[in-house]
Image: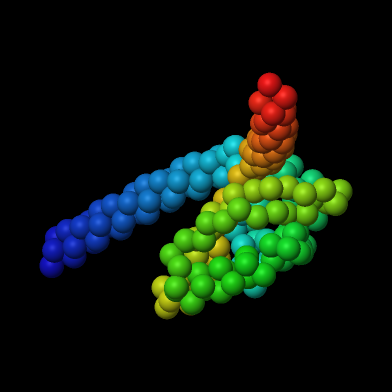
Amino acid sequence: LISLLSAAMHNSRAREIQRWQELLSTQSRLQQSETRFQATFEQAAVGIALVSPDGKWLRVNQRLCQMLGYSREELVRLTFQEVTHPDDLGEDLIMTRQLLDGELSRLVMEKRYLRRDGSTLWANLSATLVRHTNGEPHYFISVVEDIGLRKQQEQALRQAATVFESTQEGVLVVDARRRVLT
């Protein structure tokens, strides 16, 4: 009987040790995963944020803070609505509602943000919604890419095209006069 009890206790202890080793291994993998996530989040070349369904910044990376000119502490006290350009807020809210209602699986839009100094940041926003297991909205993952340089180049091209068109019209008029004079 003692021998059987001893063997059972030994087997029980072996299983307990194996469970602890599995738990430690899982904990180690989880920590490595969190470290990779943190490095990716903070070292990204784009702004990344976790945003609550009501628009409050939950977590922001340093790049987003730099783009908007706020410290991390300042930005998390605000909502995305407070830093969205007023002319773009309506469309942003409509698309956010569609995402929350499940009508969109991903929100992608060009929009303007207001920097802390009052200047405008043109950005490409891509956002997805993470839901709780019960289907309720949990938070948005938002990726913000600065497209200000591209917008400046587009404006310069539009201006150059306008100048070119007006110059061509002037050339046609000159050519028409020459024909008349000839």
Task: Name the outermost residue toward the top.
Answer: 182
Point out the image quarter for the C terminus.
top right
Quadrant of the image for the N terminus? bottom left
Residue 104 in view of the camera? yes
Residue drawn at 60 percent across, 37 percent down? 45
Q: Indicate the quadrant where residue 157 lies.
A: top right
> Looking at the image, how many numbered discs can be counted on the residues?
0
Rendering coords of residue 92 (x, y %): 62, 65
Q: Position of residue 65 (x, y in %)?
A: 73, 47
**Vertical relation: 119 (above or below) 177:** below
- The one of 175 and 92 positioned closer to us in this rendering: 175
Q: Is residue 45 above or below residue 130?
A: above
The residue located at (51%, 46%) in the rendering is 37
* Residue 176 pos. (x, y %): 67, 30
Which residue shows up at 45% across the image and 46% down it? 33
**Looking at this view, is 45 or 133 the one in front?**
45
Towards the viewer: 173 or 101: 173
Going by the image, does 11 lie left or right of 182?
left
Q: How far across and down, in percent of the image, does residue 168 sit? A: 67, 31
What's the residue at 37%, 47% (across, down)?
Answer: 25
